[in-house]
Amino acid sequence: MSARVLEGREAPVLSLRDVSADLAGRRVLDGVTFAVQPGEFTALIGTNGAGKTTLLRVILGLQPTSSGTVELAGARRGRRSVGYVPQKVLLDPDMPLRARDVVALGMDGHRLGIPVSPRAGRVRRARVEAALASVDALDFADARVGTLSGGEQQRVLIAHALIGEPELLLLDEPLANLDLRSQHEVVALLARVAEQHRVAVVMSAHDMNPLLPVMQRIVYLAGGRAVSGSTEEVVRSEVLSALYGHHVDVLRVHGRILVVAGEGDEPVRPPGEEPGSVESGIVSVP
Amino acid sequence: MNALFAPGFFTNGIVHSALIVGAVVAVVAAVVGTFTVLRAQSFAGHALGEVGATGGSAAILAGTNPLWGFIGIAVVAAAAIELLGVRQPRSRDLATGLVLGAGLGLAALFLYLGTTSQSTTGASITVLFGSLFVVSMQMVPSIVTLSIVALAIVVVCYRRLLLTSLNPDLAAARGVSLRPVSALYLLALAIAVSLSAETIGAVLSTALLVGPPAAALRLTKRPIAALVAAAGIGVLATWLGILLAYDSYTWPPSGRGWPVSFFIVVFVFCFYLLAQLRGRKVTRG
Ligand SMILES: Nc1ncnc2c1ncn2[C@@H]1O[C@H](COP(=O)(O)OP(=O)(O)OP(=O)(O)O)[C@@H](O)[C@H]1O
Ligand SMILES: [Mg+2]
């Protein structure tokens, strides 16, 4: 199998062993194995349709697996401690919720009843304030959440995910729809969060370049299969060629990494992939 | 004074019970209806009202109060929608539409049997258009109990309802099981629709259910404030409707009065327009 597991000293917060999942009768994840250590920043990289969203939903238990095991550190102690920011959430502008209300729901949205106690209210407000501050969202804390821009909503949702003090934070393409500056800000923010709160961050992206400075592990998905390890271990022509089932070149240019489908040799290609195609999204021409 | 409050308004027993029952039902409709709007389930609310009319007319045929028939069928229809329905709004609307179609045929049959066999034309009119003035005093305890059940569901599930309405995946990731929340909510909706139908009729019940919340959502960005505002608007529209309906007994064509449901719906609509004008500034800030 092409997957590798790094041995860590601590028990991993997340470990997947030989996980497969089928959607509508098609194998979308195929023997995915990797583990994430506490506080580690992991990039989940793959093209459109590679299975990133499916993998995150499997980890959350929102998508059933066909085989394999998913272990979450918190689940062993009977406590859920996973924060999640789904892909492309667009919040309804009619929702009578301020940004701060959405963040508060990340803390107690599963509880029953209406919160009324003033003492608990003060503690609650302070925690919400801190979570908003940690994502630089205080400026729009009182705006109706559906009227915020995509990037602003993104921050609010990160605060919503963080306020439950998770050990693992899963973000599905949080950089899509952000301009370059906001991308850098969000990446820096997540790296800071991972470091300060010792939260393991797993975020998906189709382009690894914005994450290169901060990521400690890469899980590279292609055709439902995954390789995991450090960037140097995984992002190499031999490893990725084996994963894709045809030759790909890895080019390092100006500190950026480009993965380009190779030419010339006849590929052993997985079903549904064009021979010699450029893996769109991973290739980026500077 | 007499021009506004026709003589006897404050001493009339029928008016008293109409004011009380009307207010209770308006509060339930507004609170449940706020989530109907947020969950984009107005169509389900409307369908439950129409399908419930089947039960209402069947109950009249069987000689009991239409409310029981209404509730019974509305709960069954809600369960059917929940079982057929999936999470995508479009599939949910399809499931709702299927249940609606099946129910309406039966409603037409029962109303037809009801009007021809027993010459109870008035009863059929009551099922379809309701009347606060004919709600009998015996029904008040049942109406209050049902109201408490519906409100309790919303209060207990309040935060889960907000989170699932905001985004089901966020809720599921927080460990909220979506099925029980959605099933309980549909039960509350079935009750709210049945109560509205009992007072302002099956045809107009959706107006009381979604009108005041739609107005309230223009006015505030806080969830509790939205619920309170919706309830206030609903009660006000209902009371003003009762007042005008009482006054209308002296209006032409004289003697019979205008239907109270008509006035309530007109006021609901006016409040919505006012909120629409007022609410443009409230969204950001
Ligand atoms: N509900 C579904 N039913 C059937 N197939 C699905 C479903 N959802 C996803 N798939 C398929 O599973 C594969 C993986 O989808 P997934 O959404 O996990 O990809 P992704 O890596 O997140 O892509 P993107 O970058 O576009 O978000 C795709 O080929 C997709 O067509
Ligand atoms: Mg995806």
Image: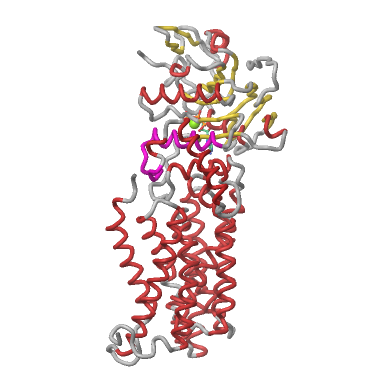
So how many labels did they put on this image?
0
- Viewer can see residue A142: yes
Label the magenta part by its dominant secondary structure: helix
Along the horizontal axis of the image, is B256 left or right of A72?
A: left
Rendering quarter of residue B212: bottom left
Residue B254: x and y in percent read: 30, 91
Residue at the spot 54% in from the left edge and 41% down from the top edge:
A106
Q: Is residue A81 above or below residue B261?
A: above
Classify residue A140 by image quadrant.
top left
Instruction: Judge by depth and name the residue closer to the eye, B133 or B58.
Output: B133
Tell me the quadrant of the picture where the N terminus of chain A can be found.
Answer: top right
| Residue A146 x/y as whole percent | 39, 44
Residue A231: % across, % down: 54, 12
Please identify the residue farthest to the bottom as the structure is shown.
B255
**Residue A148 is a magenta residue:** yes
Q: Is residue A221 magenta?
A: no
Picture layout, residue B172 above or below residue B262: above
| Residue at point 52%, 89% (across, down) | B117
Q: What colour scheme does the image use?
A: secondary structure
Closer to the camera in the image, A267 or A75 = A75
Q: Which residues are magenta?
A: A142-163
- Please, is residue A266 above or below residue A136 in the view? above
Toward the viewer: A98 or A50? A98
Q: Position of residue B160 (x, y in %)?
A: 56, 50
Above or below: residue A116 compared with residue B169: below
